[in-house]
Image: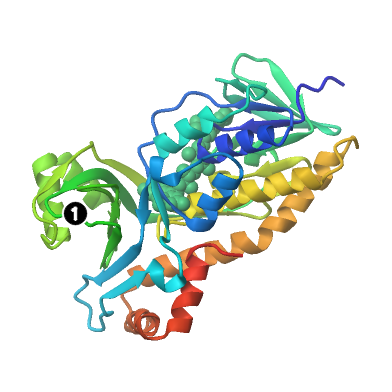
Amino acid sequence: MRQDADVIVVGGGLAGLAAAVALSRAGVDVIHLAPSAPPDRRTSALMMPSVDFLREGGLIEDPASLGHALNAIRIIDATSRLIRAPETLFDAAETGLSAFGWNFGNAALLAQFAAVAPAALQTRNAAVTAYRRIEDLGAVTLTDGSELRAPLVVGADGKKSLIRTEAGIGTREHHFEQAALVADLDLGRPIGKTSIEFHYPNGPFTLVPAGGNRANLVWIEREEMLRQTQAAGPEALLAALHERSHRLFGSITLASPSFVFPLSTLSVEQAGRDGTMLVGEAAHAFPPIGAQGLNLGLRDVADMLAAVNAADRSLPDWALAASADYARRRTGDLARTGGVVDALFRSLLAEMLPSQALRAGGLWALKLLPQLRRQAFALGMGQR
Ligand SMILES: Cc1cc2nc3c(=O)[nH]c(=O)nc-3n(C[C@H](O)[C@H](O)[C@H](O)COP(=O)(O)OP(=O)(O)OC[C@H]3O[C@@H](n4cnc5c(N)ncnc54)[C@H](O)[C@@H]3O)c2cc1C
């Protein structure tokens, strides 16, 4: 039967592009299906293990040429709850590192990954409309009706993944009433290399360092409230930003339009099977709390690469074994990270006194106990 490549990667977001480039750099014959999409306006804080993976794989060189270091995280309880948490500063120096990680613009990362793609990588501006398995091969149909076949199909086609649906991989999903509003801001007083999180009853209001006076805003609130503020115009939005940031950073101006992203959680019963692997948001999604989404997506890519490298590609059914191996490798990390982020998000929103006490107590414990802080750092950074 005709085979067009060893692997077809579907999806041109950061997870798909990283997967396609990493496989191609490892000498695997890859077709990357990346239909043109609107510019990705998000930014991603990547923790040091993710940055190290990108460096070792040759996807980035010097992170300083692309992004901005995150040396500290300051948490301010801005709720009027009965039991409030202490203001807490986490400093990377305590872990012996110069930074927790780096904050990158997603568009800049995409351009960087594309720039280091080997000439052998075949990229097509085409979406997939159907996916089926024929014996040991995966067959994807493109918008023009043509069909491509490869033993392994990697679905990196986002939260609504067609590859996941057609592969029959079940999901659990929950939609929150909260959304995230993102925008680039210029601040009167810069935040340096410290990420600032104000915790409000409906979610955190976070300013992430973006160099000089610039910060990337990630504001989680009820979606209806965010959309109303956005629709009221830039002046109303700025007034809300000044109030939410307690006017600690002087006069704020908008350096980009604002965008609202609805929030949900999604987990899969398995990250791979029968010659299909799911990476990035096709396999997991959750609110941007503790900056975990793309970090987890890059760990998917690392395990996908390991599973492909470990397979004997001279065997006709190698992709079936590799996808089962991949699912095994991902099980623990996906369950652990999804569980931690879910618990964290719900604890931030919880209005019940016992959860307020637990959360405030947790932050006091983190503030006072060095060993616990180190363990929390390791968990947050996704160290395995
Ligand atoms: C507000 C916000 C802030 C965030 N901050 C952070 C952070 O600080 N740190 C962090 O680690 N993560 C963060 N994340 C999460 C991170 O942005 C995502 O995990 C990551 O960008 C997902 O990448 P992806 O490639 O999996 O999915 P997407 O970016 O959704 O890409 C999916 C791609 O698949 C394509 N596609 C869809 N259907 C098809 C089809 N049928 N055929 C072909 N192609 C198809 C789409 O065009 C798209 O290009 C944040 C998320 C949000 C919303």
Above-or-below relation of 316 to 78: above
Residue situated furthest right in the rendering: 315
Q: Is residue 24 visible?
A: yes
Identify which residue, 358 or 24, lies in the foreground: 24
Q: Is residue 168 visible?
A: no
Q: Residue at x 52, y 24 (%)?
A: 35
Could you tell whether 312 is left or right of 24 in the image? right
User: Which quadrant would the C terminus be assigned to in this image?
Assistant: bottom right
Image coordinates of residue 150 in percent, x first then y, are: 77, 28
Res 104 → quadrant: top left
Q: Element at badge 1?
A: loop
Above-or-below relation of 204 to 164: below
User: Which quadrant would the N terminus be assigned to in this image?
Assistant: top right
Image coordinates of residue 16 in percent, x first then y, are: 57, 37
Ligand 1 within 8 angstroms of badge 1 C-beta? no
Image coordinates of residue 226 in percent, x first then y, are: 23, 49
Identify which residue, 236 or 310, lies in the foreground: 310
Q: Residue at x 53, y 66 (%)?
A: 339
Could you tell whether 100 is left or right of 339 in the image? left
Q: Identity of the amino acid at label 1?
A: Pro
Above-or-below relation of 340 to 368: above
Could you tell whether 308 is left or right of 50 in the image? right
Image coordinates of residue 163 in percent, x first then y, are: 64, 36
What residue is disc 1 on? Answer: 190
Q: Residue at x 48, y 65 (%)?
A: 380
